[in-house]
Amino acid sequence: MLKDSSDSVETAWRKFDALPSDKPGFARVSTNDSRYFEFDNGDFFYPTGFNIHSVKDLRSEDKLKLGYRPDRGNYSYEEYFDAMAANGVNAVEIWMAAWSFAIEWTSARTDYHGLGRYNLYNAWRLDRLLEYASKKGIFVHLVLDNHGKLSSSSYDPEWNDSPHNRKRDFATADGAMLEQPGDFFSNKDAWKFYQRRNRYIAARWGADPAIFGIELWSEIDLVTDIKKTYDDGSSVEWHRNATAQLESLGLAQIMTTHTCGDYNHPITYRKYYEDIPLISYVVGDAYRDKTPIVEHLKEHTETLAPFKKPLLITEYGGTAQGAAFNRIEADLHAGIWASFFLQQAGTPFLWWHDFVHDKDKYKHYLGFSKFIRGVDPRAKKFRFRSIIPTTADASPPTGISCLASGDQNEHYAWIYKDDFMFNYPDDPDSTNPVEGISLSFEAMLPETRYRAEFLDTVSGQTIISQVFTSDLSGNLTINAPPFKVDTAVKIKTAEE
């Protein structure tokens, strides 16, 4: 029976059979290792993807000079998803922004009707997007609000168009009530409309496993007067109430909120991540200028490790204002590979999605997706190691680095030229190969045969597979094949 305040409807009893599903369920924080995600069925989930906040990015058109990109709506997303699925990409970030999938915005804009009255066209589009993503094996990180909605300053301001802003045209039609953006976190009427919108979101999408995580705010620390509302506790309490309300509505996905800048910003706003249990993971940015991205990610992991929650970067790639193509490609490639060895919860999500698509840089994801297939670091006490490569005379080669992670039974390593992880070569095949490199691992099983399988980091294809034996002390030394940019290796006991 369905009943509301004015009427009810009742059907005859019906019977249905519940059949076993081959779907993995919802993404969760791993019960065995709080650094990672897993699905309800226990499968390891390592989000590998990039950020498509909007298929049309004016900043990218301006800064990267990639040219005009028409907004073809869901057709553009489907084109992306086809290419992503073919190259091992399993995750994407999507924003419910006013210019894309938001369901609530000012009635001055077509298809919007102010607060409390929803854009059903955008809701239908999001339905179709999630359906297509699921078909392609891609999981969506869904952002409910972007900082511009409450920004009146230089940070992508949209406050002058906000349906909450009572000082603008259409304020009466929109149901606006706020004098300033910061009032959003304490105004009772704003909270009432927010709860109402959440109820709709939870009812329509809260049981869709195609969404692996819900992000309440993108770059919450760029909202106008956020420091004031953080210090007085109103925005922290707002996050506590928002996550509790969404959970009470039956929302099945894990939740977070996002800070901009580098790893220092989550520390500055640590109460969002430490004091609110339903904020399940930490999300931030990793834009960089002079610091190599590998070092930047290493500092990110070390600084935020005390949170004891999964760490996921959802914006990075050069600076926030772009960079030269070879700088962005270096960040793309090195970010994907370094994230796994530094034990982050997923690959960082490149901001410049049109660079990946228009320049066909999906190959960087393909090699990594093949490498990580079947790898599961949970509960194995994998630990990060910075291995120093050596040459035939036991001296370290100049400009060559190695990251590794594993345990006594299995180990994984990535060897790379430092310069190329700062600026990727225009023609990797024309570069001089590195030869005669060895890697040594301590604390392995003594007198045990290990198979080392070296792979091409772009194609994912095996370059060479050889067997090496550890010595009496458990030290294992393996020889790397020649490589031009980088190479990766899987090391397992030969019996495996």
Image: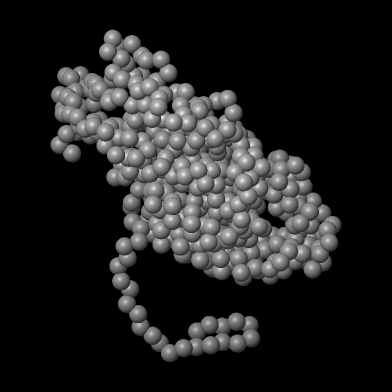
Q: How is the image coloured?
A: one colour
Q: Position of residue 375 (x, y in %)?
A: 31, 42
Residue 342 placement: quadrant: top left
Label tally:
0
Q: Position of residue 321 (x, y in %)?
A: 64, 37
Q: Identify which residue is drawn at 77% across, 47% down.
A: 152
Considering every residue shown, the one lying at the far bottom of the view is 12
The answer to whether residue 225 shows anywhere in this view is no
Residue 3 placement: quadrant: bottom right
Q: Identify which residue is drawn at 29% across, 45% down.
A: 374
Q: Position of residue 266 (x, y in %)?
A: 58, 38
Quadrant of the drawing holding the C terminus: top left
Q: Position of residue 159 (x, y in %)?
A: 76, 52
Considering every residue shown, the one lying at the far front of the view is 430
- Camera-side residue of 180 and 422: 422
Q: Is residue 148 left or right of residue 210?
A: right
Q: Identify which residue is drawn at 53% across, 88% down.
A: 9
- Camera-side residue of 119 and 219: 119
Compared to residue 305, the image places residue 76 above or below, namely below
Q: Is residue 459 left or right of residue 249?
A: left
Residue 466 placement: quadrant: top left
- Camera-side residue of 19 and 434: 434
The answer to whether residue 113 shows anywhere in this view is yes
Q: Identify which residue is drawn at 64% across, 86% down.
A: 6
Compared to residue 466, the image places residue 158 above or below, namely below
Q: Is residue 437 left or right of residue 279?
A: left
- Camera-side residue of 2 and 466: 466
Compared to residue 256, the image places residue 391 above or below, namely above
Q: Is residue 144 left or right of residue 464?
A: right
